[in-house]
Amino acid sequence: MSLDNINPSVKQAKYAVRGELAVKAEEYRARLADGDKSLPFDSVIFANIGNPQQLDQQPITFFRQVLSLVENPVLLENPDVLKTAFGYKQDVLDRAKALLAAVQSVGAYSHSQGAPGIRESVAKFIEERDGFPANPQDLFLTGGASSGVSTLLNIICDGPKTGVLVPIPQYPLYTATLALLNATCVPYYLEEDKAWGTDVNAIKQSIKDAKAAGTDVRSVVVINPGNPTGASLTADDIKQVIDIAAEESLVIMADEVYQTNIFMGEFVSFKKRLRQLQQEYDNVELVSMHSTSKGMVGECGHRGGYFELVGFDPLVQEQIYKLVSIGLCPPVVSQCLLETMVNPPKAGEPSYELYDKEYSGIRDGLAQRALALYDAFQRMEGVECQKPQGAMYLFPKIELPAKAVEAAKAENRAADEFYCLRLLDATGVCVVPGSGFGQKENTLHFRTTFLAPGTDWVERIVKFHSEFMEQYR
């Protein structure tokens, strides 16, 4: 095999979050681990990806204790030792037993949609969140939200004439998957000067242009709260998207994996808003996704998640079931983790006090670091940043001197990529250039998480930026 004869769609796909910068950052990390003292920094900060536990976010104790028991049920034969020597509470033991009863063994395949008992817990969570019922039969548990995205786009897309509306800037999972499917990404630009809000007119214009080019636009992707922007949509914003979906017969793909990462206002799910408008719209197809990777859970490596179908033709739903069945089932341990996320300890239960302390501590820490990073950007010349509303990211706009832009061209690089590489070389802080997410023409950005503990690394960015601007002034 060679580059000339492999699937050309794979070569077309791009995924900047784990691209050249991430590879170089890992090389720096390995050099530091081997004792290299020649670098101008003593640690690498992987602010390029929303990977909380890589950046010292600690797992929730209740979740991990339950998982330890479903992985090794023999431990349940010694409940007194678990309680006295390791601090397990009775509700941990009870939950593990209930989950084992639901799945029999985490080493066995489950139902292809996920264990029925766990889907019932997810349905109850959705109902309590939104105030409207959810049917476990419409729920598909997944190996992370990314797996759900791939499944759904495989169903929606049937070739290069199929178009999917994707917000720009966007999480590159969507454009990469569309490239793999040889389908068409139809971009619609978010409004940076309106806190990265969704512009209905921009969506309508994108649809019009795509149709004129012969593209069959079938779906609209919405990431709420936003990645990479951190924006959080209001109920009115969501209604406007639903309006367009109803008018144009679009499937709404609502990526809601950051729904607990809210710093301003409150999260409103697309499912809740659609149900509130149901008398007005009874023909909208919606799929909404959630994950154990984000929020205060941060269990990226366990790859747990789900999607819920609303308003889908039962015959189409049968085909979705067939497709997921080809993969047999989502990881069963991850299904158990998902159940603990949607059904955590409640007030009055033995594990609640510690759970609440850990959950609140993670939430408050994220909010504090988000504001600290935002404040730092306010002090940097030529940098504009929207105030953080949610998710785990900031996406500042940078104005670079002409000499820096020329230097980037000399290296055949985008100017924001040039800036991010220089930042990594000087500070060990790895971020992602805005060109990896898409951005309006003649603008430059970068995306950074605010997951890393402390503020030392933030000050590294401030110092670097000042020196960079002076160098290329």
Image (spheres, rainbow, N blue to C red):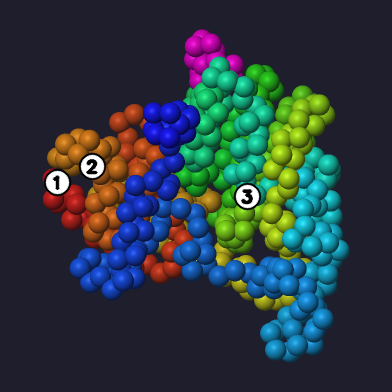
The answer to which of marks 3 and 1 sits earlier in the sequence is: 3
Kind of residue sitting beneath label 2: Leu
The answer to which of marks 3 and 2 sits earlier in the sequence is: 3
Q: Is residue 208 above or below residue 312?
A: above
Q: Residue at x 70, y 60 (%)?
A: 333
- Where does residue 401 sit, x and y in percent of width and height? 18, 41
227 part of magenta stretch = no
- Where does residue 249 sit, x and y in percent of width and height? 68, 20
Residue 144's disc is 3
Q: Residue at x 46, y 65 (%)?
A: 55
Q: Is residue 151 above or below residue 50?
A: above
Pointer 1 residue: 472
Q: Which image quadrant is residue 342 in?
A: bottom right
**Mark pair 3, 2: CA separation:** 37 Å
Q: Is residue 380 above or below residue 4?
A: below
Span colored in magenta: 205-217
Which sits in the foreground, 95 or 159? 159
Q: Residue at the far front: name it.
A: 1
- Where does residue 152 sit, x and y in percent of width and height? 66, 34
Which sits in the foreground, 282 or 288? 288
Residue 423's disc is none
**Mark pair 3, 1: CA separation:** 43 Å
